[in-house]
Amino acid sequence: MGQTAIVTGASGGIGLEFAKILASQGCDLVLIARTKSKLDEIQRFLVQTFKIKVYVLACDLSQPGSCVYVYDQINRLNIEVDTLINNVGIGDWGDFVDSNIDKLERMSRLNMGALTILTRLFLPGMVKRKHGRILNLASTAAFQAGPLMAVYFATKAYVLSFSSAIAQELKGSGVSVTCLCPGPTETGFQAITFPCEIRLTHGHKLPSAKQVAEYGYRAMLRGQTVAIPGFRNRLLAIIVRFMPQWMVLRIVKFEQENI
């Protein structure tokens, strides 16, 4: 490819799988996550396996000024970014009234703020070069409200709305925006987010992070605006539009409850 991609949240899960896919295509990488030791290990593996350049930035993107820091560091390296994968994000589970305010603030900054600011910082260069791809990670949670995960669902609705809007603005510019909306996926997200087992995932074989990343990568190459992996997920995203809101909310809450 002879290009460079940024992947946020690259130390595991879907972000790591995106990094592997891009590396296999000869794309140089800038990997961003909080834990430097994990990034260094991934860097060594990708460089040895695919003979590409891999830069790592250990950075907490929920912190004020962190996105500008990333942008400045990449500019100092004289890197032109062709692909931006906004993957980083966190979730939370439980009644909103009992939620941790610090965690809610961090979730909002990561899931919405970092994605928005990084897009704003790197998009002008892509437009100027008339070439670029942006992939923003949302979720099937974006298509309805989510009792017991109220803020998380709302952040993903923002990602879908934001991505769709700027994708339309960029028509004809040579830059595409893809919003990837996976359902529950076999990643560390489930273990970190849920203190218990919930009905939504109980007894179900979940798609792997690799499968989701491969689907998203193909959709990004096609310039597809909204990409929903899995027939069941695509069907549900359509059905909720035609169901009464009260019914959707009751079903979502039931699925989110512990068993």
Image (cartoon, rainbow, N blue to C red):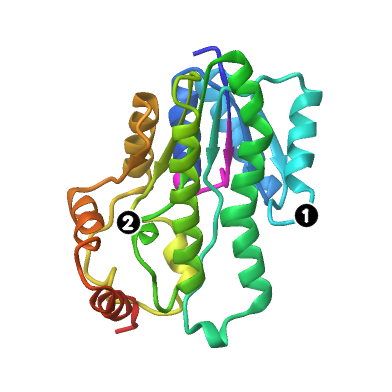
Query: Does the magenta-highlighted stretch encompass residue 13?
Result: yes
Residue at the far bottom: name it. 98
Q: Residue at x 27, y 76 (%)?
A: 199
Q: Secondary structure at mark 2?
A: loop
Q: Residue at x 49, y 32 (%)?
A: 169
Name the one closer to the observer, 22 or 109. 109
Tally of marks: 2
For marks 1 and 2, give the one nearer the viewer.
Answer: 1
Query: In the image, what residue type sits under mark 2?
Result: Gly
The image position of residue 142, as x and y in percent, is 39, 58
Name the one closer to the observer, 200 or 234. 234
The image position of residue 118, as x and y in percent, is 65, 40
Q: Residue at x 21, y 59 (%)?
A: 236
Query: Does the magenta-highlighted stretch encompass residue 91?
Result: no
Name the residue that disc number 1 marks: 64
The answer to the question of whether label 1 and label 2 lie on touching residues, with beta carbons closer than 8 A, is: no
Horizontal side of 169 relative to 38 (left or right) equals left
- Quarter residue 129 falls in: top right
- Quarter residue 123 falls in: top right
Name the residue that disc number 2 marks: 183
Horizontal side of 22 relative to 248 (left or right) equals right
Q: Examine the rendering and report whether any part of residue 191 can be seen.
A: yes
Alpha carbon separation for disc pair 1 and 2: 30 Å
Using the image, determine if residue 40 lies above or below residue 91: above
Query: In the image, what residue type sits under mark 1?
Result: Pro
For the residue carrying disc 2, how many other residues have a C-alpha within 10 Å: few (<14), some (14-19), or many (20+)?
many
Q: Which residues are magenta?
A: 6-14
Horizontal side of 257 relative to 240 (left or right) equals right
Q: Examine the rendering and report whether any part of residue 13 can be seen.
A: no
The C terminus lies in quadrant: bottom left
The image position of residue 42, as x and y in percent, is 58, 37
For the residue carrying disc 1, how many other residues have a C-alpha within 10 Å: few (<14), some (14-19), or many (20+)?
few
